[in-house]
Image (cartoon, rainbow, N blue to C red):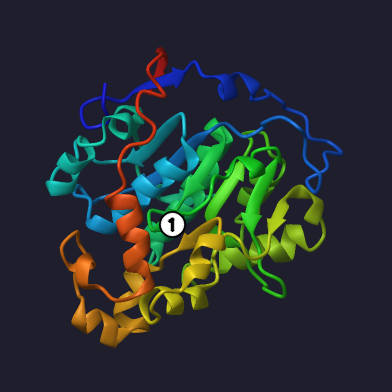
């Protein structure tokens, strides 16, 4: 059943699924070399709260992830019972994508270790926690809803935990995670919130504190991606202010920062306040090629998930 009307979860019987190892003990695991089989399940997770309609960039990112990764499932963790609007209907035009996309009931957490999320960043801080919990339950690939997947990420699925951490940065990127559900970093990450939640700073607990408390002391807990995850905000200059920046194709993922375009690139935003399948045709910047490639690409993965079996309900 498609995600718009069902929360039934399906597990495809495909070759690479059977190669996912059910490893639970990562003591002395080498996150530099990894292993020669898959540890991370090929499941993509998105969190989407309080927004019932997709926009054009949402669909572009879902579609790009599908084309590049060929996931077994795409799980949208949401408090929306049924999505509506134009682009929900557009999803039906890609049946292979539509049929592997499921909704999983999820609500924004209110607190962590007795500390209530509050202030203008409360929802974002709740999402920071929820993505860790999702990976601890399922494992897989977490993506922010405006992350564009450029290359297949299977090469990272042989590691316990993978994230973006640029050289000399005092913080990690929280937009892209790959993890086995038993990755050692995940529970330690949550524990850094104990007695130290800072409601006034957007990125302190999610980005800076795990570096200070964990990774500077134990970098072996993760596989570090320094540039290829495109978590550096400066990269967006090439998306929205540059024509024909071909190096985007060398990235593995790119964080579009689409909700920040209005103040980061005000002239660009003023001219193109809305990006959709019509305005993108005359959008003379790099993001045009990216969006066109994902949105208008023909299905090349027809029926690759034709054999599925139900395993659980959520």
Quarter of the rendering containing residue 238:
bottom left
Q: State left or right for residue 154 relative to residue 67.
A: right
Q: State left or right for residue 270 relative to residue 202.
A: left
Q: Residue furthest left?
A: 85
Quarter of the figure that contains the N terminus: top left
Name above or below for residue 221 compared with residue 183.
Answer: below
Which residue occupies 21% across, 72% down?
282
Q: Position of residue 225 (x, y in %)?
A: 67, 58
Quarter of the figure that contains the C terminus: top left
Q: Neighbour class for label 1 at 10 Å: few (<14), some, many (≥20)?
A: many
Q: Residue furthest right?
A: 28
Quarter of the rendering containing residue 17:
top right
Q: Position of residue 138 (x, y in %)?
A: 53, 31
Q: Position of residue 198 (x, y in %)?
A: 53, 67
Q: Is residue 313 visible?
A: yes
Which residue occupies 18% across, 47% down?
87
Q: Is residue 120 visible?
A: no
Q: State left or right for residue 116 relative to residue 299.
A: right
Determine the secondary structure under disc 1: strand
Number of marks drawn: 1
Q: For mark 1, what is the residue?
A: 147
Closer to the camera in the image, 230 or 110: 230
Q: State left or right for residue 4 relative to residue 203.
A: left
Q: Position of residue 18 (x, y in %)?
A: 60, 18
């Amino acid at each position: 059943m498609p995600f718009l009307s069902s929360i039934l979860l399906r597990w495809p019987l495909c070759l690479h699924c059977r190669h996912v190892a059910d490893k639970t003990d990562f003591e002395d695991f080498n996150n530099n070399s990894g292993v020669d089989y898959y540890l991370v399940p090929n499941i993509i997770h998105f969190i989407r709260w309080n927004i019932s309609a997709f926009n054009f960039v949402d669909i572009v990112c879902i579609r790009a992830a599908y084309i590049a990764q060929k996931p077994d499932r795409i799980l949208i963790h949401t408090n929306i019972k049924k999505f509506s609007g134009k682009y929900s209907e557009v999803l039906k035009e890609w049946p292979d994508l539509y049929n592997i996309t499921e909704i999983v009931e999820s609500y924004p957490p209110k607190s962590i270790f007795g500390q209530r999320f509050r202030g203008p960043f409360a929802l974002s801080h709740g999402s920071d926690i929820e993505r860790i919990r999702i990976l601890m339950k399922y494992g897989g690939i977490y993506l922010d809803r405006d992350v564009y997947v450029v290359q297949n990420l299977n090469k990272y699925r042989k590691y316990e935990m993978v994230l973006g951490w640029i050289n000399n940065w005092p913080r990690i990127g929280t937009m892209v995670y790959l993890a086995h559900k038993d990755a050692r970093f995940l529970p330690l990450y949550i524990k850094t919130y104990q007695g130290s939640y800072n409601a006034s700073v957007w990125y302190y607990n999610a980005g800076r504190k795990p570096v200070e408390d964990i990774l500077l002391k134990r970098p072996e807990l993760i596989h570090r991606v320094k540039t290829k995850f495109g978590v550096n905000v400066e990269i967006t200059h090439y998306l929205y202010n540059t024509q024909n920046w071909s190096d985007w194709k060398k990235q593995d993922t790119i964080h579009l920062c689409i909700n920040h375009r209005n103040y980061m690139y005000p002239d660009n935003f003023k001219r193109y306040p809305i990006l959709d399948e019509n305005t993108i045709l005359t959008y003379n910047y790099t993001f045009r090629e990216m969006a066109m490639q994902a949105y208008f690409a023909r299905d090349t993965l027809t029926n690759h998930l034709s054999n599925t079996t139900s395993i659980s309900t959520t």
